[in-house]
Image (cartoon, rainbow, N blue to C red):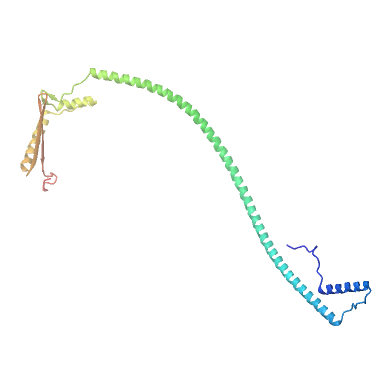
Amino acid sequence: MVRSRKNKTKGRSKRQSATLALAREALATKQEGGPAVDMIPSAEQRVKDLSAIVSYYQKQVELVKKKSWNERRRTYRLKKANHASKIRISDLKRMAKQLRLGFERKACELQGLREVSDITINDLRNRLDALWDSKYLLQNDHAKLKKRYKRLSEAWKALAKHEKDRRNKQRRVLQLTHKGIYSMQAPIQEIGNVLGIEVKDRMSKRTVLEGGVAADIQLAYEMVLADKLTYSSDSTSHRHIEYEACHIAIEVVDYLKPNAPPV
């Protein structure tokens, strides 16, 4: 910043001040009527005055040089700052341009998103209306099905009651024994009839008896060959009929491996 020098008071030199003082004394003496004062100085005095003037101006030159150097340094700093500010301004302009382009691009994307969102919202509204209509129809169907289910439940209960009454009227008695003797043929046929399966083949009495005799012979043979065995039995009666159960644990050989030790 350059300071204004317009209103600054100009200083007087020593020579000017001395000359002005001599002129004032001579003027005062002339006005009082006294002897005139010699206004012309001597050579030595003039040399001294000139030396003083030269030294004064040398000092002024030094001050001016120093001030000029300071001004040059200040101007250099200002130019450097101005250059940096120009670079900064150019960078800011470039950034502003990039931001403006980015804002424009984002504005275009936002516009596209708005259009897509509007289409999606309209589609969702249409689907919501369709769902409300479907809900109304489903509620009507549910009410109809509920009434139909109620009627079917009542009909099913009535049918179950009728079937129960019919079975009670035509109730079958399954007898496992006949005159206290087990009959294997009757249970098989009766169970098939209950399950709705027709059993065509019938087991002969000779097959049952011979199978039982063969089992007894094999059990006796194994008991004779066994080194040790465990036997337990129990019996009970029901309605004057005796029921007996037997259990035998025995070590036997594996018939697929006859030479192997008994298991």
Image quarter where the N terminus lies is bottom right
Q: Determine the image quadrant of residue 165.
A: top left
Classify 66 as above or below 103.
Answer: below
Q: Is 51 located above or below residue 243 in the figure?
A: below
Query: How many labels, in total?
Result: 0
* x and y percentages locating residue 94 in the rendered image: 64, 55
- The image quadrant that residue 12 belongs to is bottom right
Q: Is residue 73 above or below residue 212?
A: below
Residue name at image x 57 percent, y 42 percent: 113
Task: Pick out the residue farthest to the left.
Answer: 224
Residue positioned 11% across, 40% down in the render: 249
The answer to whether 43 appears left or right of 163 in the picture is: right
* Percent of width and height locating residue 129: 52, 30
Task: Choose between 179 and 207: the one closer to the eye.
Answer: 179
Q: Is residue 25 left or right of residue 78?
A: right
Query: Residue 126, percent across and down?
Result: 53, 32
Residue 202 vs residue 41, the one in the foreground: 41
Residue at image point 23% right, 26% down: 195
Residue 59 placement, left or right of 88: right
Q: Front-most of 62 and 180?
A: 62
Question: In this rendering, would 195 be left or right of 104?
Answer: left
Q: Residue at x 17, y 26 (%)?
A: 187
**Quadrant (top left, top right, bottom left, bottom right) of the C terminus:** top left
Image coordinates of residue 242 in percent, x first then y, are: 9, 27
Direction right: furthest residue = 33
